Amino acid sequence: MKKTGLVGLIIVLIILFFYFDLGQYLTLETIKTQQQQIDQFYQENKFLTLAGFFLVYILVTGASLPGATVLTLAAGAIFGFVSALILVSFASTLGASLAFVVSRYLFRDSIQQRFGGSLQPINDGIAKDGAFYLFALRLVPAFPFFVINLVMGLTSIKLKTFYWVSQLGMLAGTVVYVNAGTQLAQLESLAGILSPGLIFSFVLLAMLPFIGKKVVAVMKSRKALAGFSKPNHFDTNLVVIGGGSAGLVTAYIAAAVKAKVSLIERHKMGGDCLNTGCVPSKALIRSAKFMSHIARSQEFGIEKADAEFEFAEVMDRVAEIIKKVEPHDSIERYTSLGVDVVQGDAKITSPWTVEVDGRSINTRNIVVATGARPFVPPIEGIENIDYYTSDNLWELREKPGKLVVVGGGPIGSELTQAFSRLDISVTQVQMSPRILVREDPEVSELVQKQFIREGVKVLVNHCAKKFVQRDGSNYLVAEHDGENVEIEFDTLIVAVGRAANTAGFGLEELGVRLNPNKTIETNEYLQSSIPTIYACGDVAGPYQFTHTAAHQAWYASVNTLFGALKQFKTDYRVIPWATFTEPEVARVGLNETEAREQGVEYEVTKYGIDDLDRAIADSEAHGFIKVLTVPGKDKILGVTIVGEHAGDLIAEYILAMKHGLGLNKILGTIHIYPTLAEANKYVAGEWKRAHAPQKLLEWICRFHAWRRG
């Protein structure tokens, strides 16, 4: 109601302004004809004239009414150059700030809510360089200042910043108009004040902040590279360090655009994803899922089913799967694509030089894609335990008797369930109140209940304190509710996160800056503090997924090769991920927890997959799809799917969010029956029913009744 009242007041004031033709008093002709009377009144009532003029100027500019230019001329004619300059400078800035505040109060929330996704790049630019943009606009008086006031009110720029930048930026234009006002008698029109040459001069002046910014960037670059000798000749256009997902894609793109690129890998091509992460874990999960189906045979109408297996053979199958995928990432393949693949330990010795086992390579740019390794927390006594991580787990061939998994994140949870399904007694230890803490509580609860049904002992709120060995047995001592709890095990897997690989190849010596979590600090172009060195993948963050590493690799490759012509800011707007437990969990965009933390308003639409025909037919009728949308709109803010093949089903929403498609578009798309993908359409239908135009439907009901007679 307050906003409605303010809008109404502004509309009334504008109507009165034009109805009573108050604009006639703010014309050049009126000021010129009344100048003598105004001068006389000023001489007799100086304070009243100054105060009245100051107030009128603020009201005119604050209400975005025409006439500010004429008032500036009048100030110069009446008060003289110095007094007028001071008066107008402060009055115009206060008026502009008033318009800014009104615009922000009335319109910003609704505009950002409706067009937030489209405006995100603008918001990011304003947050970083808003003062530069505003200052440049203020320096060009030919640009309508009232438009600047209103538009800036819709952004995130702070009022304090808006005020001082406006005060400074409008000063040049104010000087020109006030000075012209001192010669009011000679002025014939407003158009005569700003000649094309003067406008061009202001435009050049407006470019100064950006020129200055560029100069500062060049100076910073020179400072970062100072003390190093730049080669006269380069052996390659690009050296990529690391043959994982990020490094492989970077090298692939560089070779595809005919650049000369060297790829250095010290261990195995394919990195963690192929050798110790995505591929082996999914192979293990597949075998474990097969065993779970046998255990559920009665659900499929099969009275009894049984299977015998050797744990070592299951792990051998994992190794065989790795070998089958290896050719995709092999040295032979990348050599055939034109990449110079070098095996050995890389050492960056200068911003343009990389040494590999005694060989020195001069290169224009370097991309660091060295990935990450499992983080092992400094728990007392762990050095006395032969523990496993996702790196060496795949060497395991003897079936564990009692397995403890420390960690309740995606990796820990996937391994917990997989090993449990292979007839192993598994205890999962998690220090947080629930597993999968990045997901909404209902998601964690659903997965945890399934773990417990399958026989996993899930210990949340248990903080690992130390490991002890007693009577030939191993024990984890964890604190729970202020008391120590001992958990016996013979095999231990540590899965509490990953740490970036930033040590040992020259970054420290060069002074490349790191983030607090030890990832490489990069700008929006993936450029490090040394301008010739870029980083992508797990070593750069902020996401540690194979698909985001590949996504970043495109930007790293293109920016290193073509950055002198055009740079591309890394786009993190639509980042999906999945946890391959059962039920599977997939997400893109915001969930409810994040939306509340960020203060984002949202609506929730939910569809239970237990109602889906195909899920019922497959005996997989569990889970749900939850979609967050802008209140009253079908614009998607985020989606969480829990259920069979969630990682596949989420793809439709990734596409929709990437290209701005709402739930109405999904509802209008034909989905094959019977498939799990129909759930995507049904959740859109739930949203549509909740937003049905009830008043219109009442009239339609009456129309049908009338048609029936």
Image (cartoon, helix red, strand yellow):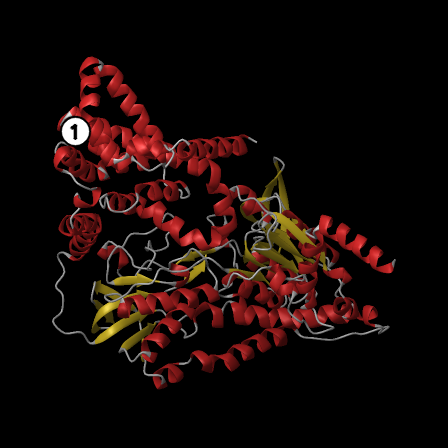
Pinpoint residue 157: horizontal percent, then vertical percent: 36, 41
- What residue sits 35% from the left and 44% below the top? 147
The quadrant holding residue 662 is bottom right
Instruction: Identify which residue, 274 or 560, lies in the foreground.
Output: 560
Quadrant where the image shows the C terminus = bottom right
Q: Which of 122 and 410 is in front in this view?
A: 122
Is residue 266 in view from this perspective?
A: yes
In front of the other: 319 or 161: 161
Q: In this view, does 457 lie to the left or right of 475?
A: right
- x and y, in percent, of residue 65 in the image: 36, 36
Residue 124 vertical placement versus 28 (above, below): below
Which residue is pictured at 36% across the width and 69% down the height?
Answer: 242
Q: Residue 117 at what x, y percent from top left?
A: 48, 54
Instruction: Report the label total.
Output: 1
Identify whether 461 is placed above or below 667. Answer: above
Q: Name the residue under label 1.
A: 77
Amino acid on which disc 1 is placed: Ala
The residue positioned farthest toward the top in the image shown = 44
Residue furthest out toward the front: 33
Left or right of 253 in this view: 638: right
Q: What element carries label 1?
A: helix
Q: Would you place residue 363 above or below residue 37 in this image?
A: below
Count neighbours of disc 1 (C-alpha within 10 A) and say few if under 14, some if 14 to 19, many if 20 or more.
Answer: many
Q: Residue at x 37, y 64 (%)?
A: 370
Find residue 614 and report its image quarter: bottom right
> Residue 407 in the image: x percent, y percent?
56, 53
Quarter the N terminus occupies: top right
Left or right, 2 with reference to 584? left
Please name whichever residue, 511 or 90, is drawn nearer the observer in this view of the structure. 90
